[in-house]
Amino acid sequence: MIRVGVNGYGTIGKRVADAVHAQPDMELIGVAKTQPNFEAHTAGERGYPMYAAIPERSPLFSEAGVELAGEVDELVAEADIIVDCTPSGIGAENRELYETHHTPAIFQGGEDADVADVSFNARANFDAARDADYVRVVSCNTTGLSRIIAPLEEEYGVEKVRATLVRRGGDPGQNSRGPINDILPNPIKIPSHHGPDVKTIFPDLEIDTLGLKVPATLMHVHALNVTLEDDVTGAHVRQLLEGENRVYVIPEGMGIDGAGKLMDFALDAGRPRGDMWENCVWGESIGVNGRDLYLFQAIHQQSDVIPENVDAIRAMFDLEDQKTSMELTDRTLGIGISGSPSGFAEQARAEFADD
């Protein structure tokens, strides 16, 4: 049983904590926060021991009625591994703390790649994280791109990827983010940072990326053009992607024509927090012209990296092979959509509980 601590209990951290708590081979021993906001109270209600990420703020937790189990140093010392879910840049600062206690750590995609020994995506390079002390789970967009590129590369070979990323301005709770009424090339320079980040997973891949930010909080949307090494048909590509558990190929008859309806779909299905862990590829967008493949996909920025963090733990401790780990993670979290708009998450968890 791997003892896991989560440093940072916000958008990503609270989801990682829940995912770790659901694993049969992991124990969530605590979470750390900088302030006693509503998420700290929720962690207490879930029974997660709370640690003060900034020791000087410990009295604030008592004043707010949040019981502390200790300070973050104690959590790091007790854990077999820390999943750092702090804001971008803070994880790199925290590495010294983890090194002091000889505690391995997982960082998130907001950190620079050199914060860790390896950048990680479960579908693409699971084995690269074996026995690593520091691993970086790549960003939501890089995760989404990697999940598509990996099976295409294995099945057909990939000559070049061109991707335009239409990115949400902020998460629902990030009321200081924008734009409010604008469409921003972000960055204006080409390529965007996403292409170089994908190359931390696929070093030899030729990829160009462009980024835009829009006034939305729901999801990112990618427009992909992938030049393959072999001639294929759209039907064959669709069949390939439908075989990927962390890719949901949206059937034409579902009436899901945008990110808003995808979020409604997740909520109606009882997904916790309305999360969509899967890439959501519009089936009718899959088209092929010679060796050029085209498609649209939506990426839920708050949740698609969550199963990757769980798989990274297993890879680092050499607990399972790639296939076994991903299947176990998917099963415990309820990942994988058959096309039914109701009950798929609960059904998956019920089947696991019955075993």
Image (tube, rainbow, N blue to C red):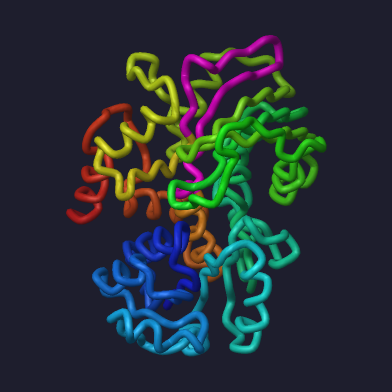
Place residue 45 in its image quadrant: bottom left
Measuring from the top left, give residue 313's x and y in whole percent: 51, 66
Is-magenta flag for residue 8? no
Measuring from the top left, give residue 236's x and y in whole percent: 54, 18
Q: Is residue 284 visible?
A: yes
Would you place residue 267 above or below residue 118 in this image? above
Lateral position of residue 271 relative to residue 122, left or right: left
Q: Can residue 5 be seen in this view?
A: no
Is-magenta flag for residue 281? yes
Out of 232 and 333, give the one closest to the viewer: 333
Residue appearing at x 63%, y 62% in the figure: 88
Residue appearing at x 68%, y 71% in the figure: 92
Indicate the quadrant containing the C terminus: top left, top right, bottom left or bottom right: bottom left
Residue appearing at x 22%, y 43% in the figure: 347
Lateral position of residue 276 relative to residue 83, left or right: left
Magenta highlight range: 280-304
Lateral position of residue 282 relative to residue 347, left or right: right
